[in-house]
Image (spheres, rainbow, N blue to C red):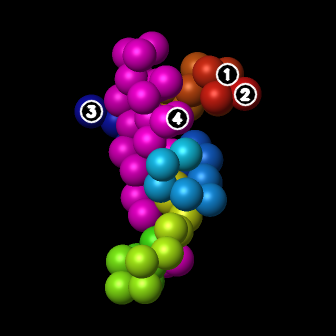
Amino acid sequence: MGDLVFLKNFSTLSEAEMAQDMLEQAGIHSVIQRGNLASAAQFSGAAGDADLFVLKNNLEQAQRILA
């Protein structure tokens, strides 16, 4: 397995999940990490940001897919 690298930040978790689905359809595995706002939002009920990561060797292809 390779190193995970940052791909993109999304303002909501649902946007990140939609992007993750697009990548999965292209055979690219990705990982979502909820940001600081999202962590606080668990207690307030608000939506928060999320970062999407992919393997380093998939970065360029993932960027093209989400462009």
Residue contact at pointers 4 and 2, CB within 8 angstroms: no
**Residue marked by disc 1:** 64
Helix or strand or loop: what does disc 2 sit on? loop
Q: CA distance from mark 2 to mark 1?
A: 5 Å
Is label 3 or label 1 in front?
1
Amino acid beneath label 1: Arg
**Residue 67, image x, y percentages:** 72, 27
Amino acid beneath label 2: Ala
First to last magenta residue range: 16-37
Give the crowd class for mark 4: few <14, some 14-19, many >=20 residues within 10 Å. many
Residue contact at pointers 4 and 1, CB within 8 angstroms: no
Give the crowd class for mark 2: few <14, some 14-19, many >=20 residues within 10 Å. few
- Residue 67 is labelled as 2
Residue 55 seen anywhere in this rendered image of the structure: no
Q: Residue at x 49, y 75 (%)?
A: 46
**Residue marked by disc 4:** 19
- Residue 9 is labelled as none
